[in-house]
Image (tube, helix red, strand yellow):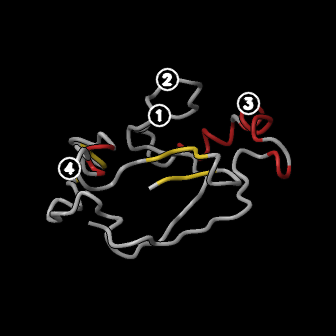
Amino acid sequence: MYTYLDSRLQQVLYVGIAGKGTPKNFWERGDFGDVFVNNTLVPNPWAASKNRGAPFDQEFYLVMNVAVGSRNGWFLDGVGGKPWVDASTYLAPGAFYQRVDDWLPTWGEGNARGMTVKAVKMWQEGACA
């Protein structure tokens, strides 16, 4: 699997999915380990698959977004100017917006915003093994 910018000659990322020399499945590559969300263990959803390419071994939807306000522990409290704490269940969105003067200028204007997508193309080349 690979991504590129404007031309296949400008490859951004290449990840071998399956075959010899592919040591990890995507759960291991993501270094998820024992992930807890709301004090509940989140297991590897692809553990039953014998295919290291899972979840890309079947049809899927690609979702791209810019999200803020995570409370799942991926962004540590008190680091990088995060204006809320994970334990503030209902207060996080308000705490985030109260700091609008800090973060809004960093988002840019129009096409200079943090995430502008010109096009996305996906196709399948051969079987996922």
CB of mark 2 within 8 Å of CB of mark 1? yes
Which image quadrant is residue 7 in? bottom right
Label 4 secondary element: strand
Q: Residue at x 38, y 72 (%)?
A: 126
**Residue 111: image x %, image y %?**
83, 51
Report the front residue among 40 and 34: 34
Which image quadrant is residue 88 in? top left
Name of the residue lying farthest toward the right? 110
Distance of label 1 from label 4 (alpha carbons):
20 Å
The answer to whether 35 is drawn above or below residue 46 in the figure is above
**Residue 26: image x %, image y %?**
30, 51
Q: Which residue is mark 1?
A: 85
Label 2 secondary element: loop
Disc 4 marks a residue whose amino acid type is: Leu
Of labels 2 and 3, earlier in sequence is: 2
Label annotation for residue 102: 3
